[in-house]
Each structure stands twice: as C-alpha cells, then as structure tokens.
Image: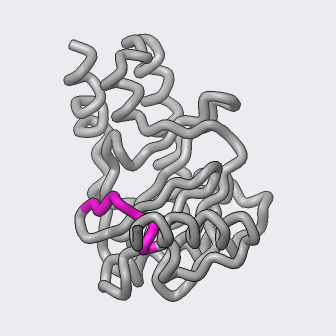
Amino acid sequence: MAEKRKADRLDEANESNEATEADLIRGCTEIIEGCVYLCKGDTYIKMCGNGKGFANERRWYRKLNNLNKGSPIYDMFLHPEITRSALIFKPNGNLISLHELAREKYITVRFLELVMVELKGMLQLLHKEGIYHNDIHDRNVLYDTDTSELYFIDLEKMSSADTGGDNDSLEELRESIMDPID
C-alpha cells in the first residue's frame, strides 16, 4: 500500500512539473554504477550525488550549455538541466545507444563504417578545442533515429588538454560495437 502511494505521488508530481529530487529517487528502480536513472516519458534523469566524477560531469555540462549554439561542438552533446545532484535530459528525438543498436542487430557493417567516420570527425573537432571525452565506448554514444545525429554522453571522465587526457580510442569503440554483429 505504501509503495503504491509513492508511485502515485511521483506521477502527480511529474504531471504538475513539481517533482522534487526526493520524489524522483523514490520513483527509480534502476541503479547502475552508483547512479540512479529514471526514464519517465521523454525525460531522462541521472542522479549520482556529489561524487568527484559526477561533479566533473556537471562542470562540463555547464561549460557546454554556455557555448554559443553556433559552436562546432555544441551539437555533439545533449544539454540537460543541471541541479546539485541530478542531470535532467529532455531530448527532442528518439535516442538509442550504439550498444543497444548493435545488440538488437539494427545496424550493418556499412552503417557502422559511416558512424565511425562521423565520430572520428566529432572527436577531431573536440580535440582541436583541447577537450577529451576519455570514456568513448558504445554505451556513451547515442544515435537519434529521427535525425541520424550522434551525441556523446557520460562526461564524468572528460578533461581538457591542460589536465591530461586523450584516451579516446575509436578502435576500441568499433570493437565493442562489432562484437554483437559478428
């Protein structure tokens, strides 16, 4: 009975757009690597508390959100609402990770080659700006099935040239996607 009341309260709070972080946490059931994830309608919420990695991720999203929309790297990322302990994403399209695409066998080797060319260009632009993702793999690249756009996510390990970095391996990404296809 108490469980049902929590779910009802979460639904009501979300419908009125007045959900608190506590309401959202109570509504979540999925915890991955210490982070709580909630997907409700077209809203995706990542909550990781105040750990060092999550603080770095929030810092990078703040920087990216403040970029000029005409910047070549602005469109490589989703732009969440940022709170003290959550990132709230409201994407416009239908997003799926490259991992899920490969697992469901929705991609061909030719599609993968085109994706790799696009990702190489995206990473070259990032690196030219002195920015390194440092955690490129199939779960950290989203594909919008409506627009065919690619987005980098999970910025916890992101760094700039002055703090070290450049652990962006396209070959490892390619291998992680190819495993389910082969």
Name the residue at 58% across, 72% down: 9
Image location (x, y in percent) of residue 133? 39, 60
Query: Where is residue 70, by image quadrant?
Result: bottom right
Residue 40 located left or right of residue 112: right
Residue 127 located left or right of residue 63: left
Name the residue at 54% across, 58% down: 44
Residue 142 located left or right of residue 146: left
Give the camera-side residue of 10 and 150.
Answer: 10
**Residue 160 visible in the displayed image:** no
Q: Which residue extends farthest front?
A: 1
Residue 2 located left or right of residue 14: left
* Image height of 101 relative to 55, above or below: above
Query: Where is residue 139, by image quadrant?
Result: top left
- Quarter occupied by the C terminus: top left
Give the camera-side residue of 25 and 119.
Answer: 25
Span shown in magenta: 25-32
Image location (x, y in percent) of residue 113? 42, 20
* Image height of 178 relative to 163, above or below: above
